[in-house]
Image: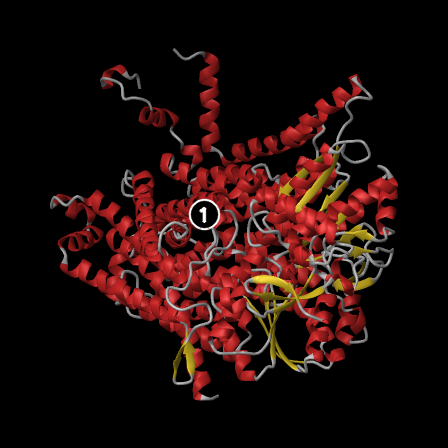
Amino acid sequence: MTSGLLLQYVVAGLTYGAIYAVVGIGFNIIYNATGIINFAQGEFAMLGGMIAWTLHHLVPLPLAVAGAVLGTMVVGALVEMTFIRWLYKPSVLRMIVITIGVSILIREAALAAWGESVRALPYFTGSEVSAIELLGARISPQVLWTLSTGAVIVGFLVVFFEYTRVGREMRACAQNRDAAALCGLPVRNLVTLSFVLSAGIGALAGCVVSPITYTSYGVGAGLAIKGFTVAILGGLGNSLAAVAAGLVVGLLESFSVVFLPTAFKDTVSLTILLAILVLRPAGLFGSREAARLKAF
Amino acid sequence: MTTPAASAWSRAAAALRRSARLQLLAFAAVLVAAQLLTRAGGKEFLLTQLTMAGYYTLVVLGLSLLMGHAGQISIGHAGFFAIGGYASAFLTTLDLSASRRLPVVALLERLHLLVARKDLYGGEALGVEPWAAFLVAVGLTALVAVAIGVPVLRLKGHYLAMATLAFGTIVGSVVVGTQRLGAADGISGVPPFEVLPGLRVMGGAAGRVANYYVAWGLVALAMLLLLNLIRSRTGRALRALHGAEEAAAAMGVDVARLKLQVFVLSAMIAGVAGAFLTHFNGGIGPSEASILKSVRYVAIVAVGGMGSLWGTLATSAVLSFLSLRGTFGSHDDAVFGVILVAVMLLAPDGILSADLRALWRRIAPAPRSREETPR
Amino acid sequence: MRHALLALAAAGLAATFPAAAQEPIKVGALLAVTGPASFLGAPEARTLEMLVEDLNAQGGLAGRKVQLIVKDTGASPEKAVSFARQLIEEEKVFAILGPSTSGETMAVKNLAEEAKTLLLSCAAAEVIVNPVAKWVFKTPQKDSQAATKIFQHMKKNGIGLVGVLSSNTGFGKAGKEQLAKLAPEHGIQILVDEVYDKAATDLTAEVTKLKAAGVQAIVNWSIEPAQSIVIKNARQIGMKIPIYQSHGFANIQYVKAAGEAAEGVLFPAGRLVVADVLPDSHPQKKVLVAYKKAYEARFKEDVSTFGGHAYDALLLLRKGVEQGGLDREKVRAAVENLKGVVGTAGIFNLSPTDHNGLDLDAFEMLTVKNGRFAVLGK
């Protein structure tokens, strides 16, 4: 194999990885604040793409994306206030089931609103055919947009959770909700905020991948499974690790195509996920101790 | 205040709550009554969807034991259903008539493990006898369940959810990626399964009543097994395990073994359901192995009340029946989502646990003082 | 339940006024309106809804109103089986239109056959009508003809080495099988044959594999958005070779989604999507333009060939009833012998050995020019 081709597979892997990573990050915020996994995260991404597509008929792209992010944040807040806020110490199993239910509702609402047609935002820069030449391989500028959006989000989250007061309070409330409440933290509002943030990040992810993957009412589940995979693989709660895991999974899938029928591409990444879960239950980059604390 | 009739009623209700035997008798009575009603109403065609709903109910009963009593989630049970169904379908639709000269094939045919059948176009094919195929299918399901269960059941919470989800997805993509299993088209033309002489699992108006009783007889059998299990020593150990795994282990419960046994049992029940429904439908497709199916099973267990076998049974029977009749048209998933979310919010312990009075108090404007509301 | 009540009411009315109000003819439709094959089922359902309304306004079939019962299968065979039994056993429908996918059609084929109910499938796979089952027909063109059309074009342009991509759906599977079967007789060699997931979001690795194998052309066979993604990815990594698509590409939304990348894509398709530019003398022109106009005016979306398959299914049924009255066996025999019926997919000439009735001429090689479909210059 020539180095150009080899690099082309790397680029393909980066493309997959960027998509998985940017969706996977969204899972971590709600997890960090509440210890639950939001199975409706993929639907936030779908909503982002759909709303932006609709707004783009009226306003320029950056405004449409901003509007989509804001709109989805409102949906996130509504979801939390309607379904989650007034539950008293829900079990993990119950939260999984409720968020699955919410995801079904959002999906069906989107079907009613937009129909089954496929939509795509235009490429942020360049067009469907443009690519940047890189040592004999070619990469679509949108992949770079996706990667850098992922980087910006991770940077924002690290600063937010480590250095801002609200962020630290959110972490406190994930670690011990009762204690956080005793200390006078507005626990319920912090949880709402985590949904708002997570919806916003999901929507941004949905917008930035839309030119590559397209958006239709049903894409949420597929995105969520991949995002969930990398969030778990990285070690829940760690956004940087989710990005790293996303790229690892993307590269593995890409190179699996060289040796195996592509019909089994998903099987490859999931088998590896199963193996890693069994061998390192805390994820690739998570610590065993932390995982034990977070188990329930 | 209570009238004699009312107190007799409540005594009967209390007895029903205590005795599994009475519950099963009442269940049998309901089954017979339902069948007689469809006959009297001239609507015997409803039995077709009731039969299919019976097999899906079988799956969720096993899952209810796993989730509600052992506290282990599985978002991959459609995978086990599919393994049972696909193995049966594959073996019974094989055509080995061209390899009759091979000694193995000849021997198997002489042992009646291979049987000839006519296909739609009048040709003859030599496939595996359905009983033999069924046993292989359930055995295979059990094997896979052990192979997956041993490593995966060490995980907890979201990690277990993800691992089982991954397993289910893998089964789905293997099924749809394998030409010999019909890829996206699935397998059709699966012959009837003669469970007992004269009793065939197959579709069509002729065998409708018999098939209804086969499906729901299996459900009753599973109920009997599960009710006895949770009332036994094993059941108590399971509850201990659900409550606190470490404590249960300290008390001498072999936690890993117990979890595995329950996992394999529930997988085998799913495999049995898959095999029977495949014969009843005359085929199986990749949609039976999809993650959406697995998610639906989990959700039905949750709506029925985690661990409430009767609640799960009722929920599954009603929802599967309505869905298979296409009652909600294109809004099938939407209605399901609404029910799911509503039940989880208003009656988190399942639909049978719904405390309607409490619900009313929450929704209705609050009364001025507590004393005014009679308890 | 509601249908049963309606039927009861209708029966009651018919008893009171025997001549005035007759029971409607029930026609069932098994369509994947939602779910993974909604690209097929949704336009099919809309088409039927529109056509049956028009038909009833014109007096219905054989002087009786048509009651269309659409069942949304979500593309799952088990639901198709359940609904088919429902339509046959309790609704006692006169005929069934659909299913949309080949897996579902194969699952209900036996049921239709046993119940002696006409099944007019909208799915493409060849196995549906080959071997022929007495009561089962299909309206989309044959995959083998699409493949032949593509290979003929390749040969003319000196292409011998190709890479085949298809999605893991019934549509993709059927096409892939025909391509593999027919390649040798056209002297074409398939170097890479890959199947991707129907929900695939990016296919850069797959096209890289084709590039590495040194293929002279790509053939892609699917109905999902992925067929549009394939073209983008191939162009993005700098492949300039011809890209062929199946007739599944005849849906302008995929051209719009692929933008610039779609320019020059080659594919065989029925003439529906190029109805406007057909010469007036073409026998299909009138039918195509009328359907396209009516559909687009009513649903505010571009017509696709899939809705056309449902159009043709209803058309064959209508012609059958016109000749055979309301006797099931007679209608079946009439449908089987229909000749020269102008539909959206082509001109149907059915026979007892050909339950599809379309020939190679049903396809036209099309391409994309300036974001629109165009007939390839001969």
Q: Which residue is at the front of the view, B53 or C296?
A: C296
Could you say which quadrant of the image residue B251 lies in?
Answer: bottom left
Q: Amino acid at mark 1?
A: Arg
x and y percent of residue C277 in the render? 67, 58
Tell me which chain the residue with mark 1 is part of.
Answer: A
Q: Is residue C283 above or below residue C296?
A: below
Q: Which residue is at the front of the view, C282 or A189?
A: C282
Residue projecting furthest to the front:
C280
Q: How is the image coloured?
A: secondary structure
Could you say which quadrant of the image residue B283 lies in?
Answer: bottom right
x and y percent of residue A56 in the render? 39, 53
Q: Secondary structure at mark 1?
A: helix
x and y percent of residue B290 in the render? 53, 56
Quadrant in the picture for the C terminus of chain C? bottom right
Please indicate, yes or no, whether residue B156 appears anywhere in the rendered image: no
Q: Residue at x 25, y 45 (%)?
A: A192
